[in-house]
Amino acid sequence: MTFFEAIFLIGISFYFIELIIFTIGAGYKFPKLKVEDFPVITVIVAARNEEENIIDCLNSLDKLDYPENKIEIIIVNDHSTDNTGMIIDSFISGKSKFKSIIPNESIGSLKGKTNALANAIKISKGEVILTTDADCIVSPTWAKTLASYYHADVGFVGGYTTQEDKTAFQGMQAIDFIYLLTVAAGTINLKKPLSCIGNNMSYRKSAYDEVGGYEKLKFSVTEDFNLLMAINDLKKYKIIYPLNAGGLVTSKACKDIKSLYWQKKRWGVGGVESDLIGYLVMFWGYLSNACILLTPFFFSTSALYLCLLKLCIDYFFLSPVFKKLKLKLRLSHFFAFEIYFIIYVLLLPFVVLLNRTVKWKGREF
């Protein structure tokens, strides 16, 4: 066995062990409340220049299956310069469970989306806050599914997000979402939170207040992760991430390479705040993908078999998750994802190290 093959084998072995651990954690089951015990909830959507997407989001929110006397929906028009505000106002007219606000108050030193969310939370009436994004469509059972897990000791419940996958470019992004969120669910359920996603998450408002709200947290372009870790640090509430198709959200995929670049960079900048375990998780994935890229230069039959093994490991990690979420894992999209995964995993650390500037919703951070 050559030195390269030995390194490749070690990387693949630890990567495989990681995915087994994530699979075990993601598969945890959690007790659910009866409908009559569901909490009062507030759904919050921050929207900035989303005239192309907002109507689909609003339609899906309007179809939510949840007790009418226990839900309010706050749409925050974050100073949009297009027709987003007009579309919101027209849609919610006469719908009592909807409310629209413009975040004119600057809470602390908060900026952009985080300030928009903080303004909405400040006036919310719900015991539990649910958030999604303006480019997302929620399933009719979304609110009911997430809220059903809020026993008295639960402070945070995450949900899975997929993306439109009509093309290979969209499909590879959808698979990437499911991959990353399965890792997030696995680590959270094993009591070691590493990440979450703001377009499908919920938290107890009292827990949010106990950490001092967004204004007391260090500024981050990944405000969802910041809040997750702050609630975790309270050591008071359970933080869970159920694998439940009823809580699925579907978002729009990035339209082009440029928008995808800025999305991944924003996530990468947020990932810099990870601890040692987070970096170890990233390291074994990085090593495995680097070895695949180097295989043509150190070609051998064993190295080729290890490349094929990596593909099989990823497929059998993802396949049962897709099945439980009632989604289809297309092979053509899977192979596109594998190429995409190798490229961004290897390049992203250098992109983030060279410059941490992030462009997001027409703003620069």
Image (spheres, rainbow, N blue to C red):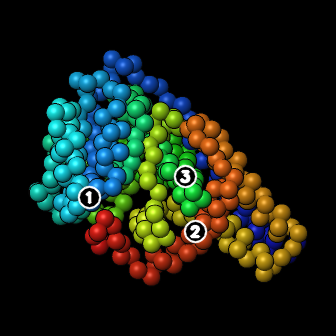
Q: Which residue is mark 1?
A: 48
- Picture coordinates of residue 335 (x, y %)? 68, 59
Kindly identify which numbered label has been placed on residue 345. Answer: 2
Residue 68 placement, left or right of 281:
left
- Count every numbered label the image shows and give the total: 3
Kindly identify which numbered label has been placed on residue 336. Answer: none
Query: In the rendered structure, which amino acid carries the disc numbered 2?
Result: Val
* For marks 1 and 3 on the same chain, the one whose residue lies earlier in the sequence: 1
Mark 2 or mark 1, whichever is nearer to me: 1
Query: In the rendered structure, which amino acid carries the disc numbered 3?
Result: Asp
Please tell me which residue is depicted at 86% across the width and 67% down the height of the picture. 302
In the image, farthest residue toward the left: 105
Residue 274 placement, left or right of 27:
left
Q: CA distance from mark 1 to mark 3?
A: 24 Å
295 or 78: nearer the viewer:
78
Query: In the rendered structure, which amino acid carries the disc numbered 1?
Result: Arg
Q: Which residue is mark 3?
A: 165
